[in-house]
Amino acid sequence: MSSSAFPSRFVFILLFLAGLALGTGSALAQTSLLNVSYDVSRELYKEINPAFVVAWRARTGETLILNQSHGGSSKQAGSVIGGLEADVVTMNQAPDIDILVKNGLVSPDWRKRYPYDATPYSSVTVFLVRKGNPKHIADWPDLTRAGLQVIVPNPKTSGNGRYTYLAAWGYALQQNKGDAAKARDFVARLFANVPVLDGGGRGATTTFTQRGIGDVLVTFENEAELIDKEVGSDQFDVVYPSLTIEAAAPVAVVEHVVDKHGSRKQAEAYLAFLFSPEGQAIIAHHAFRPRNEAVLKQNTARFPPVRTFTVEKALGGWDKVNREHFADGGIYDQIQVRR
């Protein structure tokens, strides 16, 4: 072999190997999705994700990698605004998606992309009390009694906490024929009994169940059932108040991220799976109230009938609520300053 022939053949071999490596990498490439969600949905998506991976592989032959991120709902929305590259967001309140719309991350018509205003399930706010209910907690007024400790996550960072605040406000409004001043006094007395404000629902659960702080944990129905499974039914009881709030859990695709990742079809199918019979069955299994009527009827024992109201119909909608209650200097901040 001449010295002049060696370099050209060597370069050819290197180019061939590089091309082979690139081709192999392309063939083995896997699409990954990041679902940024709220605190107490982690167990749900631990079951949803592998089920969807199997369904998607059967449908397309592609293997997906699904990643989760969980925290206080509003805090999670802030992380997405700050640059966390979520392909999809699955929150527990519409404002945490609407704020992504305002920041150009989610389409303004996100509610029209899926059934039920893009909410595959809902939950309701309940009370979790110590076994035997030693403090005889039956309804919202009991949470305002002097000396009682109520565990609630921070409404500023947690959808769970925000729904608790609004559930108490809505109850007080109804009891007092729409008198906002009396509702404010009622909620102020309730929050005066809150010794610590955790950032999310899971943190509040830890405070109540593991740290032993508080007489009652106000949380979502599904979280109460999860605690029952994890800790044992011999330690806590669930109390349904006479009136509670319905918390619908909205979902959306993060537009610029799926376009950047080339993951739009996978992300859209992932969210659509939540509305499928299989997805709805998994949702019910985790004590979230499914939208599918057939699945709901199969789980009537798990979901007792309860009187509810919604933010949209009873409190003027989320824009009004956020402006009046949760904006800086709003009613919630004023209540906290006077604690």
Image: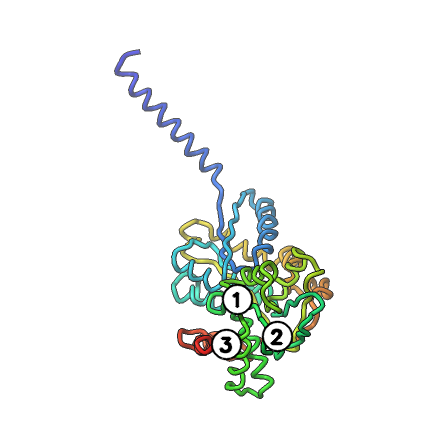
Location of mark 1 (residue) = 153
Left or right of 296 in this view: 321: left
The one nearer the camera, 331 or 144, is 144
Crowd around label 2: few <14 · some 14–19 · many ≥20 (10 Å): many
Q: Outermost residue toward the front?
A: 147
The one nearer the camera, 97 or 140, is 140
**Whole-number angstrom distance, CA of label 1 to CA of label 3:** 22 Å
Seen in the picture, residue 29 relative to 48 is either above or below; the reply is above
Residue visible at 61% across and 60% down in the picture: 209
> Which element is circle 3 on?
loop
Location of mark 2 (residue) = 244
**Mark 2 touching mark 3, by CB under 8 A?**
no
Say whether disc 1 or disc 2 marks the residue closer to the N-terminus. Answer: 1
**Whole-number angstrom distance, CA of label 1 to CA of label 2:** 17 Å
Residue visible at 45% across and 67% down in the picture: 98
Residue visible at 56% across and 45% down in the picture: 60
Question: Could you tell me residue 46's position as x and y percent?
Answer: 59, 51
Seen in the picture, residue 256 relative to 93 is either above or below; the reply is above
Seen in the picture, residue 109 relative to 231 is either above or below; the reply is below
Q: Which residue type does callout 2 highlight?
A: Thr
Location of mark 3 (residue) = 317
> Which element is circle 1 on?
loop
Which one is in front in this view, the residue at disc 1 or the one at disc 3?
Answer: 1
The image quadrant that residue 118 belongs to is bottom right
Which one is in front in this view, the residue at disc 1 or the one at disc 2?
Answer: 1
Say whether disc 2 or disc 3 marks the residue closer to the N-terminus. Answer: 2
> Which element is circle 2 on?
strand
Q: Which residue type does callout 1 highlight?
A: Pro
Q: Which residue type does callout 3 highlight?
A: Gly
